[in-house]
Each structure stands twice: as structure tokens, then as C-alpha cells.
Image: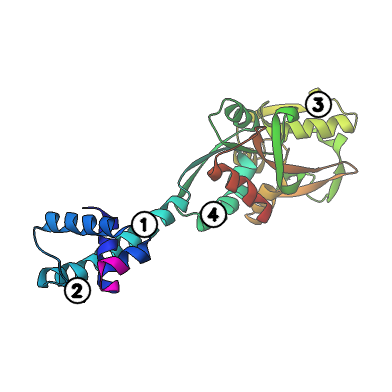
Amino acid sequence: MRIDFLKTFLEVVSAGSFLEAAKRLQVTQATVSNQIASLEKYFMVKLFVRTREGAYLTEEGKILNKRARQILDFVNITKKEIMNSSEKLRGIIKIAASTIPGEHILPIIAGSFKKAYPEVDIEIEIGDTGKSLKKLIEARADFAAVGSLMNSVNVFETKVIARERLVIIIAVSHELSDKKTIDLSEILKYSFVSREPSSGTRNEIYKILSEQHIDPNKLNMVLELGSTEAIITAVSGGIGISIVSSIAAEKAKAAGLVNIVEIKNARNWRELFLVRLKKSEYPEILEKFWQSVDKV
């Protein structure tokens, strides 16, 4: 039995004759007769009584008339559900992120995208900038979210997802606590707690130092740590001072962990980026996520 045979059956019921049904369907009367005969063979009953006045349903035909409409309704509903389902985005988006964008910016972007496309899962793996960009290049991540491009601009397409300042943080009891701003050169006098070499923050700090004609190698580096939170903990414990994201610093200050001193007369702002490799085409799920950043 075929679905289109049921449609022919219902057309005969509506038209009241095989000939009129054939005209409406734009087929031959023989075609209509053959399709009805196939249905009668399938159900092993007579469906119509044919007279000179037209075609009339048998009792068995009346049952099929009722069920045929229900069957076609269910087919149409199923078709719509399948079409709607195929339009939904599904899958996993993997993002390798450095600390600040991964912990403070991406959750907002990912949450907004998740509301629009609830069947998409977003995995954010936090590391440093160098490792995040490496995962992107090696296709172990779909995107990277970082605070520095580490001199690899040519292979990436980027979008700015936030702008922030880099600020000096000190222990609450530190001798610089009464200062609002200091020259960058003054930090050379104090023990300095730094991120690891592959950190985007460290890369940006070195750029700022170089712009001020200060040799980064003159920093009195006493400790290297793998996250901004670890830096804040070390500074609050009096191990040294550091330069970190204003986003993280403000939260730490509000918690009473550190004080903030602004950098005087130096470029201390930076952009945070969402990054992808330069390609001619991306899967729909990844392209929609990329485009969604413009709306955040």
C-alpha cells in the first residue's frame, strides 16, 4: 500500500466518481481504477460500489475513509516534526580559553548561545594562551578565546569579545597601598609574581614594558604560576606584586584580597579575542556561534 493511493481513494470519495477524481488528479481513469484495485487487494475487501450515477462507499470503504484521513494527518505531522528537527542545531562546540576570557567572558557568550540553541553543548577548557592557540591550530578545539595572539595573527581570524586594563595588584598591607598610580619602572624594586611564559597576560606585560623602554629581564621574578587566581593568592600572601587583568583584580579587591594600583603614563589596556583559523567555510553550528559574538 502506498500513501498516494490513499490520497487517490479520498479524492474518489470527494468527487463521487472515478472519472471526476481522475480529472482532478490529472491522471487517467485507468490509473485511478488500478490504485483503488490495489487498495482493495491489500485490505481484501470492496471499497466502492460503482453505478452509472457514481461511486459509493461500502461499509468497509467507510472505515478506510475515516482511517485514511487520520493516516495522512499523522504523515503530515511526522513530516513537519522531522523538518523542524532537521532545522535544530545539534553538536558540540569546543573552545580552548585562557583564564580571563574563559572564566569571566565566555560563560556569558556561551549562556546566551545556549538559550538560542539548547541542543548545542559548549565545552570550555581553561589553559593559558599558548596552549589554547596550539589546540586551535592542531584542530583540538573549534575556537580559542585569548588575551593575546602571540604574534600569530596571519593564521587567525579574530573578533574582539571584551576590552580591559592591566593593573598592578599588591597585598593589602603593602607599602604601595597608599598609591593610586605608579610609574611602571617602580615595579622593578619589588618581588614580582608572574604568569608562565606561554601566558597571554605575560606576553602583554612584556609588550608594555618594552614600549616604556624597560627590559622585562630586569623584573625581580620570584615565582611563576599557571593561573590568575594563583597569582592573586600569592600576592595577597605578601610574596610579591604582579600585573593582572582588571576584571579579575576588581573581584579580588572586592573580596578584600588585594589592592589595585594603576599604571601611570603607559598603555595598559588590551583586547580579548575569540579566534578561529582562517578557512573558506565552517559547519553551520560553528558559523552561527561565530556570528553570535557580534550580538553580545
Tell me the mark number nearer the camera, choosing from 3 and 4.
4
- Residue position for label 1: 79
Quarter holding the C terminus is bottom right
Residue that label 3 marks: 216
Query: Is residue 16 in the magenta section?
Result: yes
Range of residues picked out in magenta: 15-20
Disc 1 to disc 2, C-alpha distance: 39 Å
Q: Is residue 192 above or below residue 269?
A: above
Residue depicted at 84% across the width and 32% down the height: 209
Structural crowding at the residue carrying mark 1, measured as other residues with C-alpha within 10 Å and reported as few (<14), some (14–19) or many (≥20): few
Between disc 1 and disc 2, whose residue precedes?
2
* Secondary structure that dominates the magenta span: helix
Q: Amino acid at mark 1?
A: Lys
The three-letter amino acid code for the residue at tag 4 is Gly
Q: Give the label, 1 or 3, closer to the camera.
A: 1
Taking depth in this image into account, of 196 and 178 the one nearest to the observer is: 196
Compared across the picture, whether 209 is left or right of 255 comes to right
Residue named by callout 4: 111
Estimate the spatial distance between the alpha carbons at disc 3 and disc 4, rounded to whole Å: 38 Å
